[in-house]
Image (cartoon, rainbow, N blue to C red):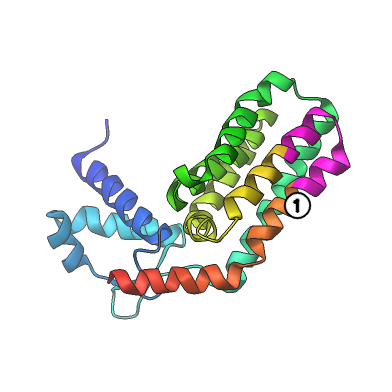
Amino acid sequence: MPSLSTSLSGSIVATLKERIVSWQYPPEYRLTEEALCREFNVSRSPVREALRVLATNGLVKRMPNRGYAVRQVNLREIEEIYEVRLALELYAVEILASRGTPPKALAALRKTWESIRRTPESFNGADMAELDTKFHEALIFLIGNETLVKELKAINERLFVFRMIDFGKANRVESTCVQHLNVLKRIVAKDVDGARAAIRMNIEEARSIVHTTLKDALARAYALI
């Protein structure tokens, strides 16, 4: 049974991680033990452990004066994350299309995106970011490889805020619906090359505006502090 300190530390890690990946903190935002102890009303022990975990995970970095600073992803890292994501998902649709995936396994996904396409105005950026994330993770899940699912989830955590910003762009919901439905169609048809081309088009469209979404994310972060 975890100790109280461990439970508190885990709760602090979860809260701070959520703030970092959703860009509530800008790059280099300072985190001190004293301020966090006051905010969470805890002793130094769970705060110190939480910061250690976040540093190990690369979300914060230790500063010379014993404080910590938020380590946000930069442009190059975002582009690299998209490269890894693309590689994983190209592999996923290739496996699904080549081995044959029962149409009913994809029916719920198709129904969801057909519904979204009919009433795109019913969904805000956060809604669409969540639905888009679930779509891509669902495809990976169908392979049955838990390691791939875990890796994609970690990638999607860092890209979530960029997805939200992306879906604020005109016609992005419509194009995403069309692309997702095409991916599903190609998988069902066992069209490996078509499925790979469809998922590449979907991911590359988001990747093509990385510069813009990063600027928007920074603006959001500095506006919140």
Residue 151 on the magenta span: no
209 relative position to 29: left or right = right
Q: Nearer the viewer, residue 76 or 47?
A: 76
The span picked out in magenta is 182-198
Q: Is residue 110 above or below residue 69?
A: above
Q: Does the magenta stretch mainly form a helix, a strand or a loop?
A: helix
Observer-nearest of 27 and 218: 218
Q: Position of residue 209 (x, y in %)?
A: 62, 67
Is residue 81 visible in the rendered structure shown here? Answer: yes
Location of residue 47 in the rendering, given as x and y in whole percent from the top left corner: 24, 57
Query: Residue type at mark 1?
Result: Arg
Residue 186 is one of the magenta-drawn residues: yes
Question: How far from the left and from the top, in percent, is residue 66?
Answer: 29, 74
**Whole-percent x and y of residue 164?**
48, 56
Does residue 146 appear in the picture of this structure?
Answer: no
Q: Quadrant of the C terminus?
A: bottom left
| Residue at the extreme bottom | 64
Along the horizontal axis of the image, is 12 left or right of 149?
left
Point 66% across, 35% down: residue: 139
Q: Nearer the viewer, residue 218 or 88?
A: 218
The part of the image, by quadrant, that contains residue 3 is top left
Query: Tag 1: Cα neighbours inside 10 Å, few (<14), some, or many (≥20)?
Result: some
Q: Which residue is mark 1?
A: 200
Q: Residue at x 54, y 61 (%)?
A: 169
Q: In which quadrant of the rendered view does residue 92 lie?
A: top right
Quadrant of the rendering where the N terminus is positioned = top left
Q: Residue at x 49, y 51 (%)?
A: 157
For numbered disc 1, what is the local secondary structure? helix
